[in-house]
Amino acid sequence: MTTLVPEDFDPPMPPSHAAFTFEILGPEHNEADLAAWSTSIDHIHRSPGWDGAGWPERVYTLEENLADLKRHRADHERGLEFAWTVLEPGGRHVIGCVYLKPDRTGQADAEARSWVSLERAELDTVLREHLRPWWASAWPMTIRYA
């Protein structure tokens, strides 16, 4: 498979914000990740870039979610796609996720997408606006924020 970034590119971590921090999404976030998105399905579908996205369609089992998080981590490590969990500062409480994937529309090299849980819906725009300059300055490609 073709990597999203050049092999010598070291993908940066998103910059922290007063309202949230980031970690690479992976199996260690399983229970908190599942709780965040499974209680927010309708909200995610109403969020920018998620209308008609196909995910999430239903609540996963813990095992299904774990498999999904393992795939996200493996894709991140191989440079195929990137995913970060959005956490409350200083805590383990997952409040959302950020993704960078190949742009299948052809409008850009990559597509960025994010969601926050219903309980933190006020951070939807804050998160997106916080990341826009980072996408533009820290990544060696054109990125469309879905």
Image (spheres, grey):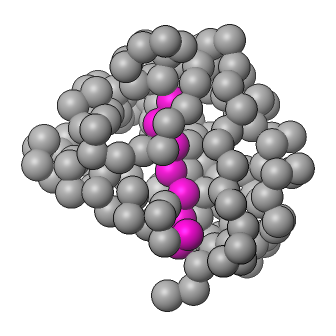
For the image, the number of numbered tags is 0
Q: Residue at x 51, y 30 (%)?
A: 86
Residue 109 makes an appearance in the image: yes
Q: Residue at x 47, y 64 (%)?
A: 77
- Residue 122 image offset from top left, x and y in percent: 60, 14
Q: Nearer the viewer, residue 111 or 44?
A: 111
Q: Nearer the viewer, residue 122 or 84?
A: 84
- Residue 43 image offset from top left, x and y in percent: 44, 29
The image shows residue 48, relative to residue 94, as above or below, that is: below
Give residue 17's quadrant in the image. Answer: top right
Q: Dominant secondary structure of the magenta stretch?
A: strand
- Residue 84 image offset from top left, x and y in percent: 51, 43
The image shows residue 95, relative to residue 47, as above or below, that is: above
Q: Nearer the viewer, residue 145 or 98?
A: 98
The image shows residue 52, relative to residue 41, as above or below, that is: below
90 vs 107, left or right, is left
Range drawn in magenta = 79-86
17 vs 101, left or right, is right
Give residue 20's quadrant in the image. Answer: top right
Q: Residue at x 37, y 52 (%)?
A: 55
The reply to whether the magenta stretch includes residue 13 is: no
The extreme bottom residue here reads 1
Q: Residue at x 37, y 19 (%)?
A: 92
The image shows residue 93, relative to residue 67, as above or below, that is: above
Q: Nearer the viewer, residue 29 or 65?
A: 29
- Residue 23 image offset from top left, x and y in percent: 50, 36
